[in-house]
Amino acid sequence: MRIEDHPVLEFKRGKKISFTYNGEKVEGYEGETIAAALHAAGVQVLSYSDRHRPRGFYCAIGNCSSCFMEVNGESNVKVCIEPLQEGMDVKTQKGKGEIV
């Protein structure tokens, strides 16, 4: 789900782009974060804690560790602040960098 109109915020959505999430093609928009694109695509779990507890889109400002994912082979990327780019390879992460 994406907010299309807001009384205060202005959305400047770029062109539609695609990336992969755990091997599946997902679409998002230029100018949004990876987490926002995944959330809009219905993805609720972004990573898992060391104790295997699911973590989702939480703070959206890069202060917590709930959104750590592997992006283009790099672990522990905070996808809530990482801009989406065409062709990115995004994977769910478990703990401190183990790929699910």
Image (spheres, grey):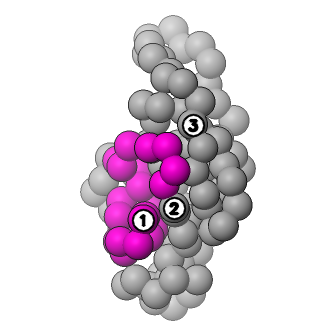
Magenta region includes residue 75: yes
Question: Could you tell me which quadrant the C terminus lies in?
Answer: bottom right
The residue sitting at 51% across, 61% down in the picture is 89
Taking depth in this image into account, of 87 and 99 the one nearest to the observer is 87
Point out the residue furthest to the left here. 63
Q: Earlier in the sequence, mark 1 or mark 2?
A: 1
Write the start and end of the magenta stretch as one range.
65-88
Q: Which residue is mark 1?
A: 72
Q: Secondary structure at mark 3?
A: strand
Crowd rating for badge 1 (residues with CA inside 10 Å; few <14, some 14–19, many 20+): few
Q: Which residue is mark 3?
A: 17
Question: Could you tell me which quadrant the N terminus lies in?
Answer: top right
Tell me the distance, in whole angstroms, between the alpha carbons under discs 1 and 2.
5 Å
Relative side of 87 to 20, left or right: left
Whether residue 25 is visible here, answered yes or no, is yes
Q: Secondary structure at mark 2?
A: strand
Q: Are marks 1 and 2 in contact (CB under 8 Å)?
A: yes
Mark 2 residue type: Asp
Taking depth in this image into account, of 65 and 29 the one nearest to the observer is 29
Compared to 80, does 66 lie above or below?
A: below
Tell me the distance, in whole angstroms, between the alpha carbons under discs 3 and 1.
16 Å
Relative side of 24 to 3, left or right: right
Magenta region includes residue 51: no
Compared to 3, does 43 lie above or below?
A: below
User: Where residue 98 appears, x then y in whole percent?
Assistant: 46, 87
Q: Earlier in the sequence, mark 3 or mark 1?
A: 3
Crowd rating for badge 3 (residues with CA inside 10 Å; few <14, some 14–19, many 20+): some
Q: Which mark is residue 89?
A: 2
User: Where residue 60 appears, x then y in whole percent?
Assistant: 40, 47
